[in-house]
Image (spheres, grey):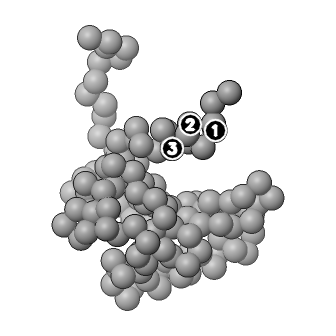
Amino acid sequence: MTDISNIFKSVLESDRSAVVICGLDHKIIYMNPVAVKRYEKWGGKDLLGRSLLDCHNEKSRECIYRVLEWFKVSKENNIVYTFYNQKENKDVYMVALRDDEGNLIGYYEKHEYRNRETMKIYDLK
């Protein structure tokens, strides 16, 4: 039987968007390869174990704190639209991570690009 954690890791590592996962203490515990490359000029893989808050200005930190508190209020509070990045034509969300009982265990930032896919449908060449 395949280890489910390897499957989840594979999903994250094959994502074309940056994925940075943080614990409740805001420490970066995972970065997929796209995130490592995207944040290379700020340290890339050396950001692992550091506080995400160190990478944001005061206003952004306040928003992160506010969203994290909202996540804690209800198990139903799981995703917040945080901004639109016009340069990259994408929406950005902050997403709660929960254990099997619904307890908040961390969070991550989700990027959804609005650009139409240019790959041909089922082009296996």
> Does the residue at mark 2 contact the one at mark 1 (Cβ under 8 Å)?
yes
Can you give x and y, in whole percent of width and height, for residue 109 in the image?
Answer: 46, 61
> Does the residue at mark 2 contact the one at mark 3 (Cβ under 8 Å)?
yes
Q: Which residue position is annotated with label 1?
A: 4
Rounded to the nearest whole Å, what is the CA distance between mark 2 and mark 3? Answer: 5 Å
Most foreground residue, 46 or 114: 46
Q: Amino acid at mark 3?
A: Lys
Q: Amino acid at mark 2?
A: Ile
Relative to residue 89, is residue 70 drawn left or right? right
Q: Secondary structure at mark 2?
A: helix
Say the numbered circle drawn on residue 9: 3
Q: Which residue position is annotated with label 2?
A: 7
Give the quadrant of residue 53. bottom left
Say the numbered circle drawn on residue 29: none
Relative to residue 45, is residue 76 drawn left or right? right
Q: Secondary structure at mark 1?
A: helix
Residue at the image position 32 percent from the left and 12 percent from the top: 124
